Amino acid sequence: MQKEKFSLKDQLFNEGKIIKIADDITRVYPAFKKDKFVKNVVQSFPELELKQRITHIAQCLRNHLPESYPDALEIIINSLPEPCNPTLNDNDFGDFIYAAHSDFVAQFGCSAEHLQISLQALEEITMRFSVEYSIRNFINAFPDETLKKIEQWSKHPHYHVRRLASEGTRPKLPWGMKVSLSVEAPLSILDTLHADSTRFVTRSVANHLNDIAKTHPDLVLERLNHWKKEKLQNPKELDFIIRHALRTLIKNGDSAALKLIGISAKPKIEIQQITVSESVQMNEYLEKTIAFVVKENCALLIDYVIHFQNSKGEMNSVKVFKWKQISVKKNEQIQLSKRHEMKQFMTTRTLYPGKHQWSLQVNGDIIHQQEFELKL
């Protein structure tokens, strides 16, 4: 029997979820035509992808609620369940179904007339499910007013609202529309949030800085050094923020980023052996073994880099892979082995047969490289 293919869109948005929304609305608005709403929403689901379903639900809410936006919005807000547990501190994302509620606000309430009630509604909704995508409509349309509200949110008692202050202003939010803010504009907000007591918030701060580091690395390094001097955050949590915020720079071997996490450039090591498969079959493993002696006490960040060949035979796609981070003593002998699956079809890339290149990177420096053949 063939295993049924998993469908995220059907798990997140299905008839049961729509009935739940309808029941919640009927509870506070008895005139709501529940059955007609459910039918109108669900009948179009087979033709729609995940994000399209969110937009479609929001449109159906518009069609079945009072014509007045403030009246419709009041019904939606009153129908919401209790906020996510405020005593938790990480990964309590809430129910994805409420993404449609914030999309309703973004579609129909992003106007000067309704700005304040819409921002207040997003504050309420984000305590049930994050609204970092919808808030970006308001940032672009009304940057000054929205940023003023976001600054207030950075001090909100509920950690979902505080997280929104960082996540909603990220310059490179995955799958999110580009925001018109400069990268400097939200920095005062991050200054506040970096000292937060909840990992859900501090992870967002680190992701935000990692976005900035891709275009303004010096700005990120300056901010992190400043936070270290301020000592407003627990040292262990600040170390998490620093490492997570610098992960792209660290992978790229940025010397200033490595120094900030205690990794020195050009450690004194003597390579004794490097063995890498000269050829590997598609969907099998590239085998690697290295052996070396360290000539000083130091911390080592060992990565490997693969230059992938594209469909035109060009090795222009480069990916850095984490291997090991260790502290070693002078004259200590180290031996490491690693297997890397050369899977042909991945969500991020497709592999093609031909020449590829493997490199060993230690503390940001490439110290060895060689080609290998990928065969079908």
Image: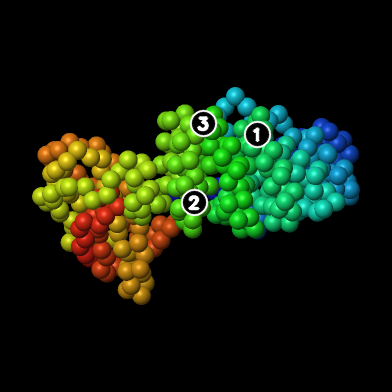
Judge left or right: residue 300 versus residue 187: left
Which amino acid type is marked by label 2? Leu
Q: Is residue 57 visible?
A: no
Q: Tag 1 or tag 3, which sits nearer the N-term?
A: 1
Location of mark 3 (residue): 232
Location of mark 2 (residue): 219
Marks 1/2 in contact by CB < 8 Å: the verdict is no
Residue count near mark 3 (Cα–Cα under 10 Å), binned few <14, some 14–19, many ≥20 = some
Q: Nearer the viewer, mark 1 or mark 2?
A: 2
* Residue 93 in which image quadrant: top right
- Residue visible at 36% across and 65% down in the picture: 317
Residue count near mark 2 (Cα–Cα under 10 Å), binned few <14, some 14–19, many ≥20 = some
- Could you tell me residue 339's position as x and y percent? 25, 49
- Could you tell me residue 38's position as x and y percent? 76, 45
Q: Is residue 2 visible?
A: yes
| Residue 155 image label | 1
Is the residue 50 above or below the residue 76 in the image? below
- Could you tell me residue 308's position as x and y percent? 32, 64
Judge left or right: residue 21 versus residue 220: right
- Residue visible at 80% across and 48% down in the picture: 115
Tag 2 secondary structure:
helix
Judge left or right: residue 226 versus residue 15: left
* Residue 293 in which image quadrant: top left
Which amino acid type is marked by label 1? Lys
Instruction: Report the front residue among 166 and 354.
Output: 166
Residue count near mark 1 (Cα–Cα under 10 Å), binned few <14, some 14–19, many ≥20 = some
Which amino acid type is marked by label 3? Leu
Tag 3 secondary structure:
loop
